Structures are given as structure tokens and as C-alpha cells.
Amino acid sequence: MLEPAQGLPDRHAGAALVLFSALLFASSGLFAKAVPVDVWTVIFWRALFASLFLAAFLRLTEGGGLAVWRLDRVGVVVAIISTVASAFFIAAFKYTTVANVTLIYASAPFVAAMIAWFWIGETPGRSSLIAASVALGGVAVTMGGLWGSPALGDLFALGMTVLMSLVVVIYRVFPKTPTIGPMMVSSLLSLPFAWAAADPFEVTAPQLLILAAFGLCFSAASVALLAGAKRLRSAETALLSICETPLAPILAWLVLSELPAPHALLGGAMILAAVLWHLVRDNRNG
């Protein structure tokens, strides 16, 4: 469980860390699209550099050691699910817009609530059901709705959202499951599959630098989010994290000149309205 919010300076530091993580996560689509190589090559290098970053981070903060590798069954399951979700995440950016990926993933809290409802019988309140219905309706609109069939990348984004929501529920059911260890194992599990499916060593030096930055930024974002969340209330963390949703399409527009489709704007507005309404309501009730 997250610790209760501490003193004001600690909360300021926590807010800064969560906002920093949101900015880094928002840049993921730019990195995934910046290098004109296949999905498996991106997966390989992102996973490799992420593993190196996390290993260095653990060495500096905890002195290294073998404890991080001692995962129980739940930790192994989390690592496997995260491996598949990570592959879906990168593939989604290759086959649809940054806006679609980010907006579909913004519905994750409601997908997690539905999973928790069916798995552990955690019945959502009336307001949660209303917000979930609006958000999931927004996902359907974002993916095409009445205008046509969803893009392949939209399906990857939806699969990634479901898998990461499942991980969230697993951590609620088994709160003692470690976080950094499964992240490292997940990155390492990706390497042999990516190497077998592509030739990652055909990239140029400039492309390698971009892919290295992708791995470092993604890992740094995860670490910053975990560190920030320990200093804030859950509702505060969620509200600040949602900044990633509008930031990612804005960055894609500025850097890639990529504009979301009209139906994605409509669906995104539905999703954001549902998420913000739900979070503000929870914050007041808390």
C-alpha cells in the first residue's frame, strides 16, 4: 500500500516526480515512431537499455545483490504479463496514432475496476459504473465506433490496457509482490524473442541512440512514478498522472505533425471527462 501523504516539501517532491514521469511516458510514442525499423527491433533495444538502467538504479539504491531476482510465482506471472503488454504497447504506436494509444490506455482504471469486480468481487459504486460506462464508450468511439473498424494498433492498445489493468489488480490482491524485479525480468524476457524475430544489430548509430533514450526514459518514468506515489495520496497521484493523456498527442502534433482523427477527439473527450469526474469525486469522498 502507498504511504499516506507526508509533509508539504515531501508532497511537492512527490508531485514533481509524478509530473516528470507523466512527461517521460508522454514521449514514448515519439521514440517508438522516430526510428523506421520493425517492431521487434524497437522491443529488443528498449528492453536491453531498460534492463541496464534498472540494474544500475538498483546498484545505486540497494547495492545490487540477488534478492531482486528471487521472484515468487506471482512475480513471475507479473513479469510474463508485462512482457506481452510491453510488446503490445510498442506495436500499438507503430500501427495507430499516439493519441489513440494514449486515450485508450487512459481507460485503464475502469478496466481494472471491471477485472476486480469479476475476480475478487469488489463491486464498484454507482458513480464508478457511470464513469466506466462513459469511458469505455469513449474507447469504442476512439477505435472507430460507427465510423468503421478499428486499426490494428487500436487493438494492440486495447490488449495492452487490459493486460496492464490485470497487473494492477494482481498487485492489489498480492500487495507484497515486488515491483522493480518483475520489471527487470520482463525486459530480459523480451530479448530472446525479439532477437529471434528480427535482426536488431542492423540499426545505425543515430537510431541506436534514439532507442537507448527510449529505454532509459521509459525506465526512469516508471521509477519516478513509484517514488512520487509514495509521497502522495492515491487520488493525487492519479490526477497528476492523467497529465500524460493530453501531453502525448500534443507532443505528437508538435514533433511528428500527427493529428488525431475527429472521432478520436470525441472519444478522448468522453474518456478524459469520465476519468477526471471519477477522480475528483473520489478525492472529495476521501
Image (cartoon, grey):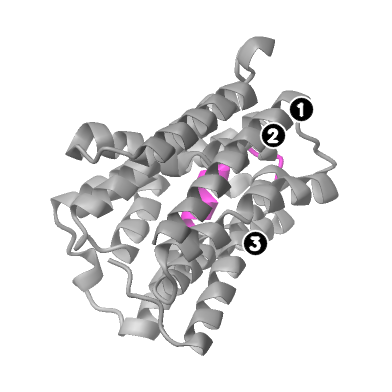
Find the distance from the CA under tag 3 to the CA under tag 1: 23 Å
Q: Amino acid at mark 1?
A: Ala
Look at 69% across and 43% down and name the residue there.
33
- In this orientation, which residue lies closer to the viewer: 220 or 185? 220
| Mark 2, residue position | 97
Q: Residue furthest left?
A: 72
**Magenta segment:** 35-48
Query: Please, what is the three-letter code of the amino acid marked with disc 2?
Result: Thr
- Dominant secondary-structure state across the stretch colored magenta: helix
**Label 1 residue SS:** loop
Q: Is residue 41 above or below residue 182?
A: above
Left or right side of 129 for 8:
right
Label 3: how many Cα within 10 Å (few below 14, some 14–19, many 20+): many
* Residue 202 in sight here: yes
How far from the left and from the top, in percent, is residue 93? Answer: 62, 37
> What type is the residue that disc 3 sits on?
Leu
- Dot 2: element: loop
User: Mark 1 sits on what residue?
Assistant: 261
Q: Which residue is mark 3?
A: 23
